[in-house]
Image (cartoon, helix red, strand yellow):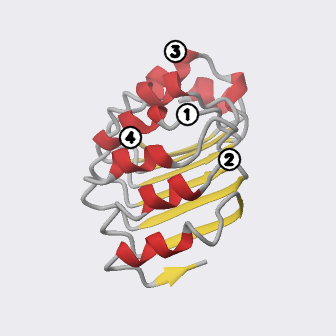
Amino acid sequence: AQRLTDLGAKVTAKNGNVTAIAIPDGTKLTDADFQQVGKWTGLKSLDVNRGLTDERLTLLAGLGELEYLQTNLAQITDDGLKPLARLKSLKSLKMFHPGAAFSGAGLAHLAELPQLQSLTVAGSLAFNDDGMKAVAKLPRLTEFRSWHAGVTNQGVPSLKELPNLKTLN
């Protein structure tokens, strides 16, 4: 935790256990640092700006109690989301500027997450109608937000498949 703090991260602990981490510049972290973050199984909240890749997402797949994940300027692919399907406590996923290789189709990997209620995908023209079809496969979503994306009028009707959707932005 001290190393992450030295690199500019804000680390929150409760009763000696790391519960939240906000990393303003993940490019300063090594793969070993991400591997260490992935070992804090009691982590509830993770916010990573820059430096997140498919490989580093794999290192975080053991965060079984993670409820909130926010990324910004990640360089991920649709298949790179597969490890997130192991995050059974995940309730909210926010992805800002996820990169040119992310259409959103990989969100379908998260269809079996029992707690996922809120999803944001913003700032990517690569996020398209295939991504919207994948969002429609997330039956427990109550909130979906997207802007500055490549979705067309043909992709929006896919959201009719979401029986619990209450908020759409």
Graded by Cα atoms within 10 Å as few (under 14), some (14 to 19) or many (20 or more), the crowding at tag 4 reads: many
Evaluate whether residue 76 shows in this view: yes
Residue linked to disc 4: 84
For residue 4, above or below residue 98: above
Residue at 43% in and 25% down: 59
Q: Residues within 10 Å of mark 1 (few under 14, many from 20)?
A: some
Q: Which residue does the numbered mark 3 point to in the structure image?
A: 32
168 lies above or below 64? below
Q: CA distance from mark 2 to mark 3?
A: 30 Å
Disc nearest the viewer among 2 and 4: 2
Residue at image point 50% right, 22% down: 55
Nearest-to-viewer mark from 2 and 1:
2
User: How far apart are labels 1 and 4 at the CA level?
Assistant: 12 Å
Q: Is residue 16 left or right of residue 131?
A: left
Which label belongs to residue 126?
2
Question: Left of 144 or right of it: where is 60?
Answer: left
Ranked by sequence position, the earlier of labels 1 and 4 is 1
The residue lying at 31 percent from left, 69 percent from top is 140
Labels 3 and 4: the sequence-earlier one:
3
Name the secondary structure under disc 3: helix
CB atoms of marks 3 and 4 within 8 Å: no
> Label 3 near label 1: C-beta < 8 Å?
no
Residue at image point 67% right, 29% down: 51
The answer for how far apart the CA atoms under marks 3 and 4 are is 19 Å
The amino acid beneath tag 2 is: Ala
Identify the secondary structure beneath mark 2. loop
Report which quarter residue 133 is drawn in.
bottom left
Measured as percent of width and height from the top left, residue 3 is found at 61, 23
Measured as percent of width and height from the top left, residue 80 is found at 47, 32
Q: Can residue 13 be seen here? A: no
- Residue 41: percent from left, percent from top: 32, 37
- Tell me which amino acid carries mark 3: Ala
